[in-house]
Image (cartoon, grey):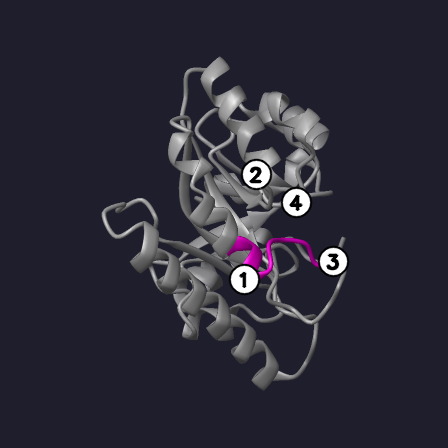
Amino acid sequence: MSIRAHIDALRKSVPQDVTIVAVSKFHPSAMIREAYDSGQRTFGESRVQELVTKQQELPEDIQWHFIGGLQRNKVKQIAPFVSLIHSLDSERLLLEIEKQGATNDRIIPCLIQLHVAEEETKSGFSPDECRQFLAKGVWRECSHVQIAGVMGMATFTENKTQLRTEFRLLKSLFEEFKTTYFTKEPDFKEISMGMSGDYTIAIEEGSTMVRLGTIIFGER
């Protein structure tokens, strides 16, 4: 199947109110262009240099999402154009994004990355760390950062019950934070969860944004 065929199939199976982020990391610009020509406009990259290069090569109306671990010293390279950062995982990173947002005179939307998996290699705030981060309230003073929701990755497992449990935890944390801190913030609305292997379960459990690479572009 072609990239276009994969995207067309996904459009039929993924609800219209769920954003498909085409994970284009490690794939060449020509493949991204093929997806773009099929109507896809939102792409996810996890390495800053690769993202900057592709952003310069490809159409200006692409919405670039940064979906990997983000080092503070790299924020300035993507701050002028990034549409959404999925991996806000510390106060220090928040302050750097605020600084670069101010420099570029733009508000940068971010998702709080939460660690809900059983794998230690996954990064993000633990639920309690995130509660402390939000309660401290430094984010309220950051006028160039918009906290737009949460992101999390489930454990890499075939166990559907475990996947469902982890996605439910992420959804419940989103609802807790929405009620406690973001009731009057309509932009706090995204739950980024689900990848090529588990996105159907994630959508059933309330995902608003799925990050799909293999199912669109094939194996790297």
Instruction: Give how far apart the Cα atoms at labels 4 and 3 are.
Output: 18 Å
Give the alpha-carbon distance from disc 3 to disc 1, as whole Å. 33 Å
Callout in the foreground (4, 1): 1
User: Is disc 4 surrounded by few (<14), some (14 to 19) or many (20+) residues within 10 Å?
Assistant: some
The residue wearing badge 4 is 68
Instruction: Report the residue marked by disc 2.
Output: 91
Q: Residues within 10 Å of mark 2 (few under 14, many from 20)?
A: some
Give the Cα distance between marks 4 and 2: 17 Å
Residue 167 location (% of width, % of height)? 51, 71
The answer to which of marks 3 and 2 sits earlier in the sequence is: 2
- As helix, strand or loop, the secondary structure at mark 2 comes to helix
- Closest to the camera, between mark 4 and mark 2, is 2
User: Is label 3 or label 1 in front?
Assistant: 1
Q: Please, what secondary structure does the residue beneath circle 3 have?
A: loop
Stretch in magenta: 122-130
The residue beneath circle 3 is 219
The image shows residue 94 at horizontal and vertical percentages of 54, 35
Q: Position of residue 18 (x, y in %)?
A: 39, 58
Q: CA distance from mark 3 to mark 2?
A: 35 Å
